[in-house]
Image (cartoon, helix red, strand yellow):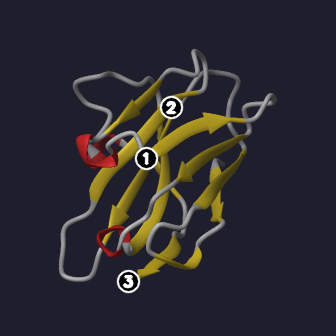
């Protein structure tokens, strides 16, 4: 069974940086799309970024504005989301999720993801 565990959340001041990790286990031997979603209080969950474990091609939502970078380790069992120049608007619970295949036109569709982590809180103070 696939399990995803996020880590790396925390509290930072505006302008600071955090790197989130998503450690996966139980993947069958195939490529996956690992995405990051976030949900702020009172708001809908939204896609942040994704990366294909096979090609390492990243995908980003426009609001990341070049501040965030999705990557993965050499063994492809851990994916990362480096977040720079954080602002209070980035405060949310961040989740990683996995599905088969990344597509430019659909990687943000959360209902297409089969596996989810428990989330890690990111809090940015002004």
Q: Is residue 32 above or below residue 14?
A: above
Residue 102 picture quarter: top left
Indicate the quadrant containing the C terminus: top left, top right, bottom left or bottom right: bottom left
Mark 3 element type: loop
The residue identified by callout 2 is 51
Of the numbered discs 3 and 1, the one sitting upstream in the chain is 1
Residue 72 picture quarter: top right
Residue at 18% over, 73% down: 43
Badge 3 crowding class, 10 Å Cα cut-off, few under 14, some 14 to 19, many 20 or more, is few
Mark 2 element type: strand
Of the numbered discs 1 and 2, the one sitting upstream in the chain is 2
**Horizontal relation, residue 45 to residue 21: left or right:** left
Mark 1 element type: loop
Residue at 47% over, 61% down: 95
Mark 1 vs 2: CB contact within 8 A: no
Alpha carbon distance from label 3 to label 2 = 30 Å
The residue identified by callout 3 is 126
In percent of width and height, residue 85 lies at 45, 59
The residue identified by callout 1 is 67
């Amino acid at each position: 069974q696939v399990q995803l565990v996020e880590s790396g959340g925390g509290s930072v001041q505006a302008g600071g940086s955090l790197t989130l990790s998503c450690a996966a286990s139980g993947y069958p031997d195939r490529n996956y799309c690992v995405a990051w979603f976030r949900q702020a209080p009172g708001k809908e969950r939204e896609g942040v970024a994704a990366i294909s474990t096979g090609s390492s091609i990243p995908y980003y939502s426009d609001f990341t504005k070049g501040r965030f970078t999705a990557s993965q380790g050499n063994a492809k069992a851990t994916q990362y989301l480096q977040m720079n120049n954080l602002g209070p608007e980035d405060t949310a619970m961040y989740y990683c999720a996995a599905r088969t295949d990344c597509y430019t036109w659909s990687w943000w569709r959360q209902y297409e993801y089969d596996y989810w982590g428990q989330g890690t809180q990111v809090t940015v103070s002004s």
